[in-house]
Image (spheres, rainbow, N blue to C red):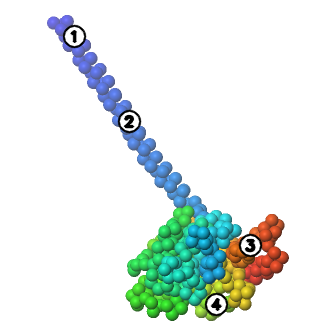
Amino acid sequence: MKKWRNRFIIFVCLIAAVFCGVYTVYRVRQEKMETSSIYEDKSEELTAVQQEEVYSELKEATILAAGDIMFHEPQIRAAYNEGNDTYDFKDTFKWVKPYISSSDLSIANLETVTAGKQYGYKGYPNFNSPEEVIEALKYAEFDVLSTANNHSLDQGKNGIISTIDNIEKYGLKNFGTYKTPNHSVLIENVNNINIALLSYTYGCNGMEQTLSSEELGYMINLIDEEKIRSDIEEAKKQKADLIVVFIHWGNEYQRSPNENQISLGEKMVKWGANIVFGSHPHVVQGSQIIKKDGKNNFIIYSLGNFLSNQRLETVDNKYTEDGVMVQIQVEKNYERDETIIKNITYIPTWVRKYKDGNKLKYEIIPVKEFLDNKEEQGLLTTKEYTRIEDSYKDTMDKMIK
């Protein structure tokens, strides 16, 4: 009996030992799971902190703007290749391409349309250029083209539509003219900075009558203070960090802005525009800094001609040969949710027109580069060198220092 009792006690002890072992294993596993859970939570917290640190960093972007790009008949003829019945305008931009391509966002005013060969290629007064001009602007590495200007309707509704189609065909974007109603404000995300682009023109040389009132209302942005103010408000609602306005205004060939330009420029800054690029006068007009809420805002009243056949010999005005690319460095502080203009660089340009054998050539010259580089100076005649010296001084004298 005692023997059986001893066996029973041993048996109970073994069961207890097994139970304790199982329980211990269970607790260890539970503790590991709890510990793992704690570390996972901390890992998530660290990720959130890291993300916050990332967005508290300063982000920068460079915006480059160039002025009026026009193609008069001598330019079109000069680019023609009779052998294969095509046009090539790329060489015109070879000297300025490095400046355009090195900027994060490059824009310019396209002052012609590409309606198609069936309308005949022509210059002033009713422009129509081969689509290869868009191809050349793509080669130069422009990103977006402002298409609201007084020549937007030179070939009517079809001219607007075909031009937009060709811009899209070559992988660029446009703003200021549109194919359909209810279009939204164009906002480009550049290095995590949202840049809104708006464009307007004073008119279209009386060609507005080629559109119905409904079409005119949505196909081209005409200067209207209420519309501009409303569009700026819409850009703010869409969380734009910076608002850029490209505006076609002023008096042709006048080297100073008129009262209406100055008044409207100040109003646009008051409404929330940060950068205003002016076009249309075909000569360079001055620049200005306007402070608002402790921040600098920039206006240049006219960027001048980036490319055209206008010059001393054709319009008796040497200043039509001059233009300026403006490169603006902007900086966004995520912690403050604030974007500022950090630096402004002026790059004066001059349109060179010369004969290469029997072929007429056009080149946009970055003036300072040619003045500083003896090898490039060697490409110019003495008369051309003197001319770009004058061009540089004429342009920079207009710029705010």
Q: Secondary structure at mark 1?
A: helix
3D distance between C-alphas at marks 4 and 3: 34 Å
Q: Quadrant of residue 375?
A: bottom right
In x, y percent, where is residue 143?
56, 69
Circle 4/circle 3 CB separation < 8 Å: no
Q: Secondary structure at mark 3?
A: loop
Q: Earlier in the sequence, mark 4 or mark 3?
A: 4
Q: Residue at x 36, y 33 (%)?
A: 29
3D distance between C-alphas at marks 1 and 4: 116 Å
Residue that label 3 marks: 357
Q: Earlier in the sequence, mark 3 or mark 2?
A: 2
Q: Residue at x 58, y 89 (%)?
A: 125
Residue that label 2 marks: 31
Question: Tag 3: residue type?
Answer: Gly
In x, y percent, where is residue 311?
71, 85
Q: Residue at x 73, y 72 (%)?
A: 356
Choose mark 1 or mark 4, whichever is in front: 4
Circle 2/circle 4 CB separation < 8 Å: no
Q: Earlier in the sequence, mark 2 or mark 4?
A: 2
3D distance between C-alphas at marks 3 and 2: 88 Å
Instruction: Please indicate whether residue 159 sits to the left or right of residue 263 in the image.
Output: left
Residue that label 4 marks: 252
3D distance between C-alphas at marks 2 and 4: 81 Å
Question: Tag 4: residue type?
Answer: Glu
Q: Nearer the viewer, residue 275 or 150?
A: 150
Residue that label 1 marks: 7
Question: Tag 2: residue type?
Answer: Glu
